[in-house]
Structures are given as C-alpha cells and as structure tokens.
Image: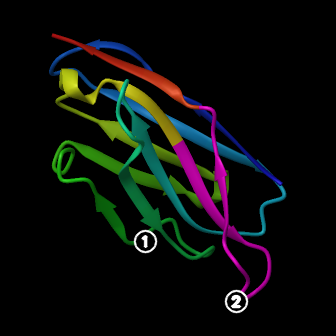
C-alpha cells in the first residue's frame, strides 16, 4: 500500500557528508514512525535513526544508534511524506546499503504495518 523510494546515496571521502531522502507514496493514512536502517556486507541490518510524529507536526521523538550519534540527524516533512538523514563526518565503517522504513496504521488502534524501500548505497572511502 505504501511505496518508499530512497535517494541521495553515493561515494564520499571520509569526513564528508551526504543527505539521504526517502519519499513515501501510495495509500498513506497515518504514518506513526519513519526510520533509517543500514546493512553492511556480512553484517545484519541495524537501526541507524528513527523519528516519530503525529500527522499534525513535522516534529517528533528521535533516537540514534550510538555509532552515529552526534554525526547523523534524522528529520521529516509530513506534508511531503518524506524523511531525511543528514550524515556528517562520515567514516569508512558507515559504508552500507541504507534502507528507509515506515510504520503506518490504517485505523485508530490498528496494527502498525511496516514498509521498506529498496535501499541506497553509501560508500565512504578512506
């Protein structure tokens, strides 16, 4: 019901910055959370950052993985159904495929449904 398209990945040198975007489309009723995950070669997918909000505001609670805290910032624009991940001071260990995730409920008190993007590659060179 919801499609997610990530963009903004690429190749960057250590210390550089990238901004990822994820636009949601389709049958959007009420998104209660959006987040970014990443998966490096040979490793499990891990949560990078998450943000929650109501439909009436762009602001919500955020949380970050310890490894990116202070370097990455997650934000959202509810009017555009888009979530962003600003990544600064990138390190080679940040190299991974980054995936957008959104949780949506279709009815009040209903079960949240998870949707995933197809991922965008981020490569940080030494």
Question: Dot 1 surroundings within 10 Å: few (below 14), some, or many (20 or more)?
Answer: some
Instruction: Check the image and report above or below for 29 versus 34.
Output: below
Judging by the rendered image, the residue that carries numbered circle 1 is 60
Residue 93 on image: x %, y %: 21, 27
Question: Tag on residue 109?
Answer: 2
Q: Residue at x 52, y 49 (%)?
A: 83
Question: Would you identify the image quadrant in which residue 114 lies?
Answer: bottom right
The N terminus - image quarter: bottom right
Question: Tag on residue 34?
Answer: none
> Does residue 61 appear anywhere in the picture?
yes
State the SS at label 1. Answer: loop
State the SS at label 2. Answer: loop
The C terminus - image quarter: top left
Could you say which is closer to the camera, residue 115 or residue 56? Answer: 115
Q: Is residue 108 magenta?
A: yes
Q: Which residues are magenta?
A: 100-118
Question: Would you identify the image quadrant in which residue 102 lies?
Answer: bottom right
Q: Residue at x 46, y 21 (%)?
A: 121
Left or right of residue 108: residue 79: left
Q: Going by the picture, which residue comes out furthest to the bottom? A: 109
């Amino acid at each position: 019901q919801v499609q997610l398209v990530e963009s903004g990945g690429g190749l960057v040198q250590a210390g550089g910055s990238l901004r990822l975007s994820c636009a949601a489309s389709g049958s959007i009723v009420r998104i209660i959370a959006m987040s970014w995950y990443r998966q490096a070669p040979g490793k499990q997918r891990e949560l990078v950052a998450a943000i929650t909000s109501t439909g009436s505001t762009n602001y919500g609670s955020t949380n970050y993985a310890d490894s990116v805290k202070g370097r990455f910032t997650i934000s959202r624009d509810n009017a555009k159904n888009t979530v962003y991940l600003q990544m600064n001071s990138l390190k080679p260990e940040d190299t991974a495929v980054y995936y957008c995730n959104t949780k949506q409920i279709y009815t009040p008190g209903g079960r949240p449904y998870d949707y995933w993007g197809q991922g965008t590659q981020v490569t940080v060179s030494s």
